Image (spheres, rainbow, N blue to C red):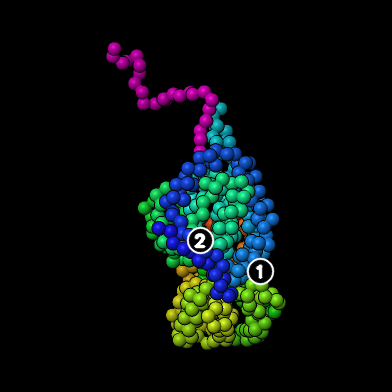
Amino acid sequence: MASSLISYEPATGAELWSGETGDAGAEVALARAAFPDWAARSVSYRTESLRRFANVVRQREGEFADLIARETGKPLWEAKTEVAAVVNKVDISISAYAERTPKRSLEAALGNKVAVRHKPHGVLAVLGPYNFPAHLPNGHIVPALIAGNAVVFKPSEKTSAVGALLVRCYHEAGIPEGTVRLLLGGPEQGRALAAEANIDGLLFTGSARAGQALHRQFADTPQKILALELGGNNPLVVWEGKDIAAAATIIVQSAFLSAGQRCTAARRLIVRAGEEEALVAEIVRLMDRLIVDHPHAEPAPFMGPVIDNGAADLLQEQFLGLMMKGGRVIRRLERPRAGLPFLTPALVDVTDVADRPDEELFGPVLQMVRVESFDEALAEANHTRFGLAASLLGGSPKLYDRFWSEVRAGVINWNKPTNGAPSNAPFGGVGLSGNHRPSAFYAADYCAYPVTSSETEIARASIAEGLRDPNLLED
């Protein structure tokens, strides 16, 4: 029996939206029935359908951004950038499909030809996160549709309203309703969708813990594609930096944009011991200026609340745990509004914490580690099971070359924030940050599979060795 699903505004606690949970099996069956017709359409037909989708989103930009801001708590200006990313993803994915999955013909001996073409997998399940409830699932759905797949999309139960609007935009663009299905629900529906025998793959963005569970679940089904885009415990190393103000700005952007709710957010700030005082003072000065407020506030806030009170409670517990282990608080993680998940940005020196937890603190908490040498800085940067993003601020080209060579991460930047990866390049990590199926521009790779064909118009065949002489055969 369907149950009610309710979404709340993090900034106010008010009910925003409600709907009924769906049935995974029924949604997959509808997508399976719609798949053959969609796959039979030409690539040009499918790409034009997606371009119409981009126009629908563009026309509803204000409504879309407002809903994202209300349901996630992120500032309206940031929600607008997410809507723009949804629109831009279409042209990027069209280019990626052409580049990553082209039709190729190769000449072989005796006039034969070898052709390489690509086929869609079939029905792909997409599980979306709450931090970018439109952009990140859209980054799976658009390339999946271009490739000819049908999709069943389950948004996070915390951002179901945005998920519902996203799917409505696909349908308004003329993409058949069976081709993109919306499954509403919580973890139970997500597990049911992942376990559906009739899906051909799962595209997931979320926590490393959930990704590990999915990896174990899919171990017995190697015929199904599994693309995991997971989190990170990302290091940001400052070394021989000359512009302290610029470094502090990049650090604050890396750690606290989206209230720290980005998988690429800087979690660990690694600095040279004895040379960090001026930098820390500038970081704190900037942190104290950050406006934390509701999405539509004036003046516009830098960051809003985290997604809900449960997330805020967990972050406070994790911050307290660092303090109890010996962390020296530079700026405390405060809860300025009772009953609401607003948190102030925090900075804690964890150099003397011997058993620092290798976890993704998914919020506005930055941990600082002081080291004596660049060798130690590299060792500390790699002292994690994750490997998503890493950044070096300062240093020479030679030092950056070494940093790039020795740091284990899928996104490595120099004098740039750890977050804000470009959509026209691959995006993914190593370790617990993914399963070597990078998304963004490379999403085309896991949305279709290559087929190699040897072809000729006239059948010719001979067996050159291993046959008896026909003249010696008995009658």
User: Is residue 204 visible in this depiction of the protein?
Assistant: no
Please identify the quadrant where the C terminus is shown. top left
Callout 1 amino acid: Leu
The residue to which callout 1 is attached is: 76
The residue positioned 64% from the left and 81% from the top of the image is: 287
Q: Is residue 136 magenta?
A: no
State the CA–CA distance, disc 1 to disc 2: 24 Å
Label ID, residue 463: none
The answer to which image quadrant residue 14 occupies is bottom right
Pick the residue in front: 110 or 34. Answer: 34
**Disc 1: CA contacts within 10 A as few (<14), some (14-19) or many (>=20):** many
The picture places residue 17, in percent across and down from the top left corner, at 55, 65
- In the image, farthest residue toward the left: 474
Please identify the quadrant where the N terminus is shown. bottom left
Q: Earlier in the sequence, mark 1 or mark 2?
A: 2
The picture places residue 240, in percent across and down from the top left corner, at 65, 77
Label 1 with label 2: CB-CB less than 8 Å = no
Callout 2 amino acid: Gly
Pick the residue in front: 419 or 204. Answer: 204
The residue to which callout 2 is attached is: 19
Residue 168 vertical position relative to residue 112 in the rendered view, above or below: below
Q: Is residue 110 left or right of residue 2?
A: right
Pick the residue in front: 175 or 396. Answer: 175
The residue positioned 51% from the left and 43% from the top of the image is: 34
Check disc 1 and report its element: helix, strand or loop.
helix
The residue positioned 58% from the left and 84% from the top of the image is: 336
Check disc 2 and report its element: helix, strand or loop.
strand
Please state the extent of the stretch shown in magenta in the rendering: 446-475
User: Is residue 460 visible in this depiction of the protein?
Assistant: yes
The picture places residue 204, in percent across and down from the top left corner, at 49, 58
